[in-house]
């Protein structure tokens, strides 16, 4: 990039500066209270298996692997768990993507002699399944230290005629910060010594609030930023979706995401 970079955008200019970010991140994660980290992880273990369900059901071999790893136990016939409960084969047996994220969190905390708490937003229709899966994957102490609250449900609105759907649906991941504020949980976390709130999807099992990430956050926040956001390109041209009903049979209503739409309704007329 060379001269195109603003000096303020360069996070580390040498190995020593990178090491300093790690050290600062370690100290920030440990926090000022013994045994309690200044970092809280927020994970939306909610929503429904919409796009993932359509994809999986079109690939029987994938469903067979999910069944082989035991992820269909307790699931209704012809249904699948939410994507964050998809299984991964590990040396310790089958683990869900969500379980792996919480396990990584525990490992980071243990290495620093602290406990990094997590807060999960659950869906009313799958909360029991989530807790059952986690009870078999993470320790009782970590599960006891995990905050839980329920996602809001609401009727969706059709863009065409502004009418409402007949059934309630989950309001989306954006409900997470709204509910934390509405329930006064942000203030509670600050009172408990929390300084950093790390938020991501509940199926990104290779990501965690590790020392480098927290060190980067500390450096940028000290410069006046309110926070940082890490994003990746959306390779499937999926800008979103919404409630859909059939013209001939308006009683048939469902949630439609971009991959379900006809090609002539997609930008450019086709998927990349």
Image (cartoon, rainbow, N blue to C red):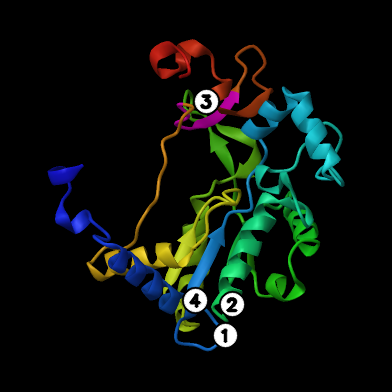
Q: Which comes sooner in the sequence, label 3 or label 1?
A: 1
Work out how far the residue at label 1 is from the one at label 2, CA to CA, in angstroms. 6 Å
Depth-wise, is mark 2 or mark 3 nearer the camera?
2
Q: Which residues are magenta?
A: 237-244
Q: Residue at x 66, y 75 (%)?
A: 145
Where 32 sits versus 258, above or below? below
Does 238 lie within the magenta span?
yes
In the rendered image, is residue 237 in sight?
Answer: yes
Query: Mark 4 and mark 3: span between their CA atoms?
Result: 37 Å
Q: Nearer the viewer, residue 216 or 272?
A: 216
- Which residue is located at x 61 percent, y 62 percent? 104
The mark found on residue 189 in the picture is 4
The alpha-carbon separation of the residues under discs 4 and 1 comes to 15 Å
Say which of marks 4 and 1 sits in front: 1
Residues at marks 3 and 1, CA–CA distance in whole angstroms = 45 Å
**Does residue 65 appear to the left or right of 224 in the view shown?**
right
In what element is the residue under mark 2? Answer: loop
Horizontally, residue 198 falls left or right of residue 93, namely left
Find the distance from the CA under tag 2 to the CA under tag 3: 40 Å
Please give the name of the residue rendered at 45% of the width and 18% of the height, measured from the top-left corner: 266
Q: Which residue is mark 1?
A: 35
Task: Assign the N terminus to one quadrant of the image.
Answer: top left
């Amino acid at each position: 990039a060379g001269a195109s970079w603003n000096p303020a955008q360069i996070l580390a200019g040498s190995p020593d500066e990178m090491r300093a970010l790690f050290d600062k991140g370690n100290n920030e994660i440990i926090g000022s209270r013994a045994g309690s980290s200044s970092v809280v992880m927020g994970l939306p273990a909610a929503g429904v298996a919409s796009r993932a369900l359509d994809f999986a059901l079109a690939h029987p071999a994938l469903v067979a692997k999910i069944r082989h790893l035991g992820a269909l136990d307790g699931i209704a016939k012809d249904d699948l768990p939410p994507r964050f409960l998809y299984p991964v084969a590990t040396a310790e047996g089958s683990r869900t993507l969500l379980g792996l994220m919480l396990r990584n969190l525990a490992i980071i905390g243990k290495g620093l002699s602290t406990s990094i708490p997590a807060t999960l937003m659950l869906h009313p229709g799958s909360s029991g399944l989530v807790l059952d899966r986690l009870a078999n994957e993470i320790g009782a102490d970590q599960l006891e230290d995990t905050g839980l609250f329920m996602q809001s449900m609401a009727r969706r609105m059709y863009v065409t005629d502004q009418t409402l759907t007949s059934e309630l649906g989950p309001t989306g991941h954006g409900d997470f910060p709204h509910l934390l504020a509405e329930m006064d949980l942000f203030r509670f976390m600050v009172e408990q010594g929390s300084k950093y709130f790390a938020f991501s999807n509940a199926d990104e099992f290779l990501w965690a609030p590790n020392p480098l990430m927290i060190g980067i956050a500390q450096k940028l926040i000290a410069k006046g930023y309110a926070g940082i956001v890490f994003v990746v390109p959306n390779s499937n041209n999926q800008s979103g979706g919404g409630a859909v009903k059939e013209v001939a049979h308006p009683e048939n209503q469902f949630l439609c995401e971009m991959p379900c739409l006809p090609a002539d309704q997609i930008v450019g007329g086709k998927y990349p």
